[in-house]
Amino acid sequence: MATLSSTHCRLHLTCSFSSSSSSSFLQRVTFSSNRFLHTNLSLKSLHQIPQQHASSYFKLQTIITLSAAAATVAPVESDNDNKGLEEKLSSVTSLKESLGEFGFEKDENESIVSVTVVGASGDLAKKKIFPALFALYYEGCLPKNFTIYGYARSKMTDADLRNMVSKTLTCRIDKRENCNEKMDEFLKRCFYHSGQYDSQENFAALDKKLKEHEGGRISNRLYYLSIPPNIFIDAVKCASLSASSANGWTRVIVEKPFGRDSESSAALTKSLKQYLTEDQIFRIDHYLGKELVENLSVLRFSNLIFEPLWTRQYIRNVQLIFSEDFGTEGRGGYFDHYGIIRDIMQNHLLQILALFAMETPVSLDAEDIRNEKVKVLRSMRPIRLEDVVIGQYKSHTRGGVTYPAYTDDKTVPNDSLTPTFAAAALFIDNARWDGVPFLMKAGKALHNKGAEIRVQFRHVPGNLYNRNIGTDLDRATNELVIRVQPDEAIYLKINNKVPGLGMRLDRSKLNLHYAARYSTEIPDAYERLLLDAIEGERRLFIRSDELDAAWSLFTPVLKELEEKRIIPEYYPYGSRGPVGAHYLAARYNVRWGDLGVDIDQ
Ligand SMILES: NC(=O)C1=CN([C@@H]2O[C@H](COP(=O)(O)OP(=O)(O)OC[C@H]3O[C@@H](n4cnc5c(N)ncnc54)[C@H](OP(=O)(O)O)[C@@H]3O)[C@@H](O)[C@H]2O)C=CC1
Ligand SMILES: O=C1O[C@H](COP(=O)(O)O)[C@@H](O)[C@H](O)[C@H]1O
């Protein structure tokens, strides 16, 4: 038995080989990474892997490389085994040849990945995309051959772009070894091309430059649309018609908003599909790239103690909470057209809800997971207007500082009714979740910044310790908190005996505090998602039917709010938001978990 293992960035792969001639060459390939948790592939089944399973060329290539190496080093124990070795080598050869069937290249040196950031002069590109690409480069996660292009209308030279990007690379790893050296290497791979978003000619000029870098190798091209939504289609059309890869893949990351209701979203999808196939479209929801959101399924499906409790029998309510302690500063123009329900709830919080509530997927494959999420979304009860509370922040003076009202933003109309806060009660009408309120709350200009999932469990029936707990049984229910950000943590509130001779109970936490438990830094969501897009992994991107289901849920209530011109409840900048959110929760016998005094220990 020979065992080999290898690491390629996030991939950990072990091949186990049998030296017995009677068994097939590749007894087992144990393929483990943070997404392929455990997959056994036989040599035969390897030929049958659908392309979406073998989600990146790197993974297959690693198998091939290791297979070849293992065949060479496999211990030869008898004459029979010599014959076995010949078979092994011929299998490896045919395996290598079969790469073509998967559409993957044979050698990393023969291909190159170009990432073009469309809208490179903008806020998101500077704040998130370039730093994420650098972090991936620093960690050795980008392919050996890669080029990064910035594309926008602004007139800039390569040097200007590098200068602009270098200012943003004060990223999480800037204090680490060789950071400056790595930054210089990275910046040398960054280039700029100025052009209009609706000019095929300008994109053709980009194509020419990309080809020069590609130098005849297999070209794989990723476009990141970091531009306002009204120009998505122009840019996709031009990139697709004038600057697609001729011999490799072309993928496009599309930023939200994906429309503002069912109709506009369907129209956007239809237009995108004039130029791209669904497989080429990577609709990003960066919350899916956050570490603790990614961990949700692991927590649930790999711990026996959670999954049996994940049902209406034990869970009283689930809360999905997002808050920011700043307003729409600088983004009022965009925000006023969308509002907090479209900005946060319809996408980020709903995606978390779907992941939280889905049934066990058949596998960790992207399609299996997305199938389960769609089922949840399609089982949701239409949202009633009376189950929604909206608010808008008003000016507030504290400690001598005056904080602006939402409508003080010059790009926002004075009479805007756009909600900057919303709370809603949602229900999933299926066997698992029947009657369990899923409460969402999202707001800007609140007293703190954070995102968390709170799971409140039912009371202990016939609790022996009721007398010790007192009258407020709600305070004694268990609560599981998944703090997505900041200061990532997962903790479970339990009742515990205070040490001593008496019988006094208190509430304590079983606390998995990431900063204390793990020394590794948590990667930014954009790093994970960019890497996934490069590797062709679609699990964390939104499929078009998911998007349709999400809009079907929210569009009617959004329309009703707008048609009836519902006045938002005004709340002071920096406060805890409108009191209406408490009444909404109380209607379902729920108390927002983030408002109580949390336990420190
Ligand atoms: N910023 C953020 O935090 C987030 C942004 N997003 C989404 O990402 C995308 C990009 O966001 P962001 O970087 O903030 O956007 P910007 O407003 O900064 O726009 C990006 C670039 O697009 C070009 N541009 C801007 N307005 C127009 C216009 N009307 N017509 C043509 N070109 C224009 C500009 O480049 P030039 O003039 O050089 O061509 C600008 O630098 C948007 O879809 C946004 O909704 C999503 C989540 C968070
Ligand atoms: O998509 C968006 O997300 C940000 C919040 O993202 P986070 O990762 O910083 O929590 C929000 O500010 C913005 O309005 C919204 O468009």
Image: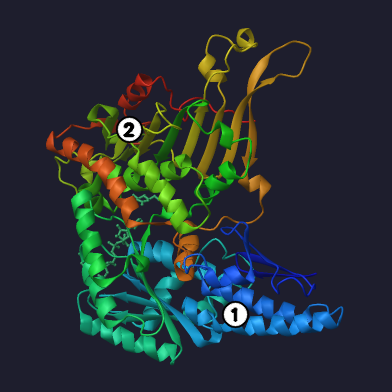
Residue behind mark 2: 424
Which class describes the residues within 10 Å of circle 2: few (<14), some (14-19), or many (20+)? many
In the figure, 32 relative to 419: above or below? below
CA–CA distance in space, label 2 to label 1:
53 Å
**Of 313 and 221, which appears nearest the observer?**
313
Q: Report helix, strand or loop for mark 2.
A: strand
Q: Nearer the viewer, residue 279 or 156?
A: 279
Placement of 570 over or under 335, stated as above or below? above
Give the side of residue 455 with respect to residue 426, left or right: right
Image quadrant occupied by the C terminus: top right
Residue 515 located left or right of residue 241: right
Give the residue displayed 18% in from the left and 32% down from the top: 567
Q: Are marks 2 and 1 in contact (CB under 8 Å)?
A: no
Residue 179 relative to residue 587: left or right: right
Q: Find disc 1 in the rendering and name its residue.
A: 95
Location of residue 478 (image quadrant): top right
Q: Nearer the viewer, residue 546 or 401?
A: 546
